[in-house]
Image: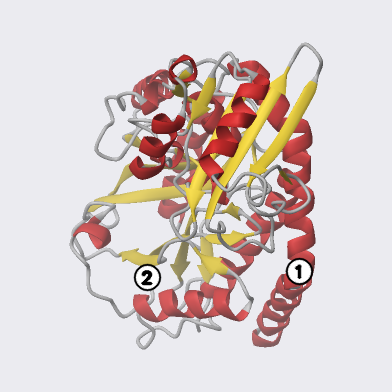
Amino acid sequence: MKKTVTFLLLLIAISLNAQILSERDRATMRDEILADRFTNLLPKLMDDTGFDMWLVIAREYNEDPVMRTMLPAKWLNARRRTMLVFYRDKATNKMERIAVARYDVGDNITSAWDKEKQPDQWARLVEIIKERNPKNIGINVSKHFGIVDGLVKTDYDELMNVLPQQYKERVVSAEKLAIGWIETRTDKEMKLYNQLVDVTSAIIDEAFSNKVIIPGKTTTDDVVWWMRQKVTELGLETWFHPTIDLQRDNEELKSHIYSFTKGEKEKVIIPGDLLHCDFGITYITLNTDCQRHAYVLKEGETEVPQFLVEAFKKGNRIQDIFTSNFKAGRTGNEVLAMSLKQGKEEGMRPSIYTHPLGTYGHSSGTTLGMWDSQGGVPVTGDYPLHHNTVYAIELNTTVNIPQWNKDIRIMLEEAGFYGKDGFRYVNKRQEAIKAIKVF
């Protein structure tokens, strides 16, 4: 049996390394994805939101979060002050991508500033605006969506100081356009996303195995730092510090965010523990966010106890209820209310706190509940669902376990894609608690 497990773990390691590209190949893929987004996605987003000009302005090391998603692979930061101008003439089907900068921004955005001819960068920006005479000028300011609120006060003040009055009156928030850029996933990105979720799952599978866990010795923090180290060795990054927690029959059920709010101390893992992880990685501009369960078999046990199997099914059922309510145009608060109502009518105790996922872990787009806002989330929860978007389907359900004389919580999180054909998980979901055999 041990030889079989070792062989399977070796296959996981080989699979992981085979899927992860070299830095050079990652850069090539990133630039290919970016070119596709600029060419095929951006014009449509500008048409759909009614913008003919969009300004994205930032300075080196103080980048607008939107600009970060637009920089080519060789640009790790903006350079000096970088000004990007996107102009869309729908009547002629013309799309311009201009940089008011000393150099082209990769292969996708062309420099339109010769400092020797026009020493003033802001003056050159005004010239470009006047030449195109846009009916509106979108800038990245937003009260409620932080990622698309990236235009800093200094740059905003400079812009408004140099703009002629007639153009000042055309400056508006590009909130919907910027959110669309951040939340929309392309076909190229979704092919990559499948691989990324697969890698995430493989790391969790290895962490939840007897290669890592020795009952009575290994602590929850040991597993956390093993995961961090594994990610580093694979040349990847985590976008948040992972957590490993556990539930057992002789301990009171705590809040599912206890470890974050109270700084729960590490615990030694023992047979009979129901383990839970929260883990996500970053790879070629995309992010995962995943929560899974495993059970450490006791001596004499060959499978997960049936009462835990049945409890886990209830978590899957809440997922099914929730994702079946996804419909374009429906707000996050509407989906949340419908799903909670249905789950409770079926006798369950659900809590839903799902967030957009993609180029950022906690991304911009439709918010579907928060752990402390189960009655709905103002503003971000009122934002409607759009096609071609990805979400961390994050939720839990509380289940009474008579065998333990207590409640437990099944906590799940999986990357899910919502498109014109409906909802699907990016690359499967967990449908059974993993058994860790240690004897």
Q: Secondary structure at mark 1?
A: loop
Considering the image in quadrants, where does the N terminus appear? bottom right
Label 2 crowd bin: few (<14), some (14–19), many (20+), radius 10 Å: some
Residue 174: x and y in percent read 50, 26
Q: Where does the image place residue 275, in percent across and percent down from the top left? A: 40, 65
Q: Is residue 151 above or below residue 215?
A: above
| Numbered label attached to residue 21 | 1
Left/right placement of residue 307 relative to residue 317 reads left
Q: Considering only vertical position in the picture, is 367 above or below 266?
A: above
Residue 39 x/y as whole percent: 78, 35
Which residue is identified by label 2? 272
Disc 1 residue type? Answer: Leu
Task: Please tell me which of labels 2 and 1 falls first in the chain.
Answer: 1
Residue 75's image quarter? bottom right
User: Can you tell which quarter of the image residue 355 is in?
Assistant: top left
Rate crowding at label 1 as few (under 14), some (14 to 19) or many (20 or more) other CA atoms within 10 Å: some
Could you say whether the residue bearing mark 2 is in a helix, strand or loop?
loop
